[in-house]
Image (cartoon, rainbow, N blue to C red):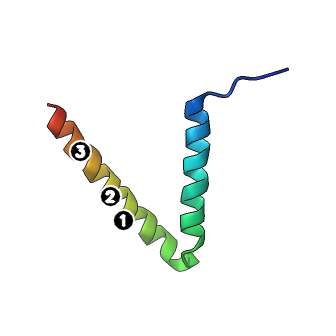
Amino acid sequence: MKTKISKAQIEVWEWKEKAFKEIEKIPENERIDYIIKKTRKIIEKIKKKKQQLV
């Protein structure tokens, strides 16, 4: 049985692989702080883009 894989699914998998490689390089005890900081930056970028659209 063949299943279709969408372009979006492939992009998500590629993004996950890239994120894992970045996190893998960081010592275990610093990973959570790194993820929190990175997430906050992304949330701020999204908020700014939403404000620009309004």
Give me the disc on residue 37.
1
Q: Name the residue under label 3.
A: 47
Q: For residue 28, what is the image quadrant?
A: bottom right
8 left or right of 1 in image:
left
Q: Which amino acid does label 1 sit on?
A: Lys
CA gap between label 2 and label 1 equals: 5 Å
Instruction: Please say if the residues under marks 2 and 1 sit with CB atoms less than 8 Å apart.
Output: yes
Residue 16 screen position, x and y as percent: 58, 51
Q: Mark 2 points at which residue?
A: 40
**Mark 1 crowdedness (10 Å alpha carbons): few <14, some 14-19, many ≥20:** few
Q: Is mark 1 on a helix, strand or loop?
A: helix
Q: Which amino acid does label 3 sit on?
A: Lys
Residue 3 screen position, x and y as percent: 75, 23
Relative to residue 12, is residue 17 depicted above or below? below
Please state which of residues 23 and 14 is positioned toward the viewer in this rendering.
Answer: 14
Measuring 59% from the left and 60% from the top, which residue is drawn there?
Answer: 20
Relative to residue 45, is residue 23 depicted above or below? below
Measuring 51% from the left and 71% from the top, which residue is drawn there?
Answer: 31
Relative to residue 51, is residue 29 depicted above or below? below
